[in-house]
Image (cartoon, coloured by chain):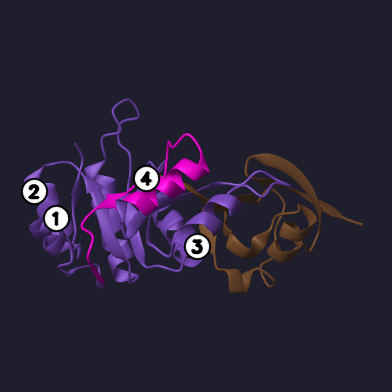
Chain colours: A purple, B brown
């Protein structure tokens, strides 16, 4: 137990930030915002994934959620979920950088809606553009070695294989 | 007053001609502190909201933070 606690305190660096926790946690599919908040606190994670969605006219959608996340003081990793092309993903990433004040982006370009397999061609294209624009790109990719190499060649320092 | 028809998050909206993104957000009661905006698929930075004017048949996306995995 003591050994595990010591290991947990070892700092590591990812995407230009120094962390002690090695776990990232998603913020979706919790039964309520309160359960999400409790889970994030209990896990002691330092990185939480978030997203952007169309906001309904005359509504305050998202404000409550984003207020909770801000108050937790964690790093956020926005994603481009729901995108099916490099162009869409680039636009969402640019919006996310401004809204969430981070250059981190979990690049997701879906190639198959049934199993959510990423589209490697569009993902690599988007990664090239986003890296040039100063993003730290965390691409959601397949376990294909050639695609992985192309993402690294594009300037990605991190890969997030699906599975 | 001349008006224009634009699509905002997929809904048709009538707005006055010469309507900026800043004005559009105000008229449609968007709370713009934590919003991302794109017009015809192109990102528009917040500091350009006041000087970016909408045109007939523009397609505007207004996005807000939500949970995600």
Q: Percent x, y for residue B59?
A: 62, 48
Q: Percent x, y for residue B68?
A: 42, 45
Residue identified by numbered label 2? A146
Q: Is residue A33 magenta?
A: yes
Q: Secondary structure at mark 4?
A: loop
Q: Residue at x 38, y 53 (%)?
A: A41
Q: Which residues are magenta?
A: A18-42
Instruction: Say yes or no: labels 2 and 4 on the same chain.
Output: yes
1 and 2 marks in contact (CB < 8 Å): yes
Q: Using the numbered discs, state the Cα–Cα distance from disc 4 to disc 1 in whole angstroms.
A: 17 Å
Q: Using the numbered discs, state the Cα–Cα distance from disc 3 to disc 4 in whole angstroms.
A: 33 Å
In the rendered structure, find residue A150 and report the number of the disc placed on it.
1
Q: Residue at x 38, y 46 (%)?
A: A39
2 and 3 marks in contact (CB < 8 Å): no
Q: Using the numbered discs, state the Cα–Cα distance from disc 1 to disc 2 in whole angstroms.
A: 6 Å
Q: Nearer the viewer, mark 3 or mark 1?
A: 3
Q: Nearer the viewer, mark 2 or mark 3?
A: 3
Q: Using the numbered discs, state the Cα–Cα distance from disc 2 to disc 3 in whole angstroms.
A: 41 Å
Residue A11 image-quadrant placement = bottom left
Q: Residue at x 18, y 54 (%)?
A: A159
Q: For this view, does B24 lie left or right of residue A118? A: right
Residue identified by numbered label 4? A85
Residue identified by numbered label 3? A71
Q: Percent x, y for residue A47?
A: 33, 58
Q: Nearer the viewer, residue A116 or B16?
A: A116
Q: For this view, does A77 lie left or right of residue B64? A: left
């Amino acid at each position: 137990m003591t050994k595990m606690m010591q290991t947990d305190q070892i700092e590591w660096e990812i995407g230009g930030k120094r962390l002690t926790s090695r776990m990232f946690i998603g913020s979706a599919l919790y039964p309520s915002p309160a359960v999400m908040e409790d889970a994030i606190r209990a896990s002691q994670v330092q990185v939480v994934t978030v997203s952007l969605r169309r906001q309904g006219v005359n509504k305050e959608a998202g404000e409550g959620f984003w207020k909770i996340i801000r108050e937790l003081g964690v790093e956020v990793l926005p994603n481009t979920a729901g995108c099916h092309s490099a162009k869409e993903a680039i636009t969402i990433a640019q919006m996310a950088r401004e809204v969430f004040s981070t250059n981190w982006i979990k690049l997701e370009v879906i190639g198959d809606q049934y199993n959510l397999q990423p589209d490697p061609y569009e993902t690599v294209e988007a990664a090239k553009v986003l890296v040039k624009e100063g993003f730290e790109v965390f691409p959601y990719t397949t376990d294909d070695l050639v695609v992985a190499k192309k993402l690294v060649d594009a300037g990605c320092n991190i890969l997030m294989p699906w599975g | 007053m001349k008006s224009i028809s634009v699509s905002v998050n997929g809904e048709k909206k009538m707005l006055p001609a010469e309507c900026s993104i800043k004005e559009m957000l105000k008229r449609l009661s968007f709370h713009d502190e934590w919003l991302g905006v794109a017009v015809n698929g192109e990102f528009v930075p917040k500091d350009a909201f006041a000087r970016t004017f909408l045109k007939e048949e523009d397609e505007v996306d207004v996005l807000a933070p939500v949970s995600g995995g």
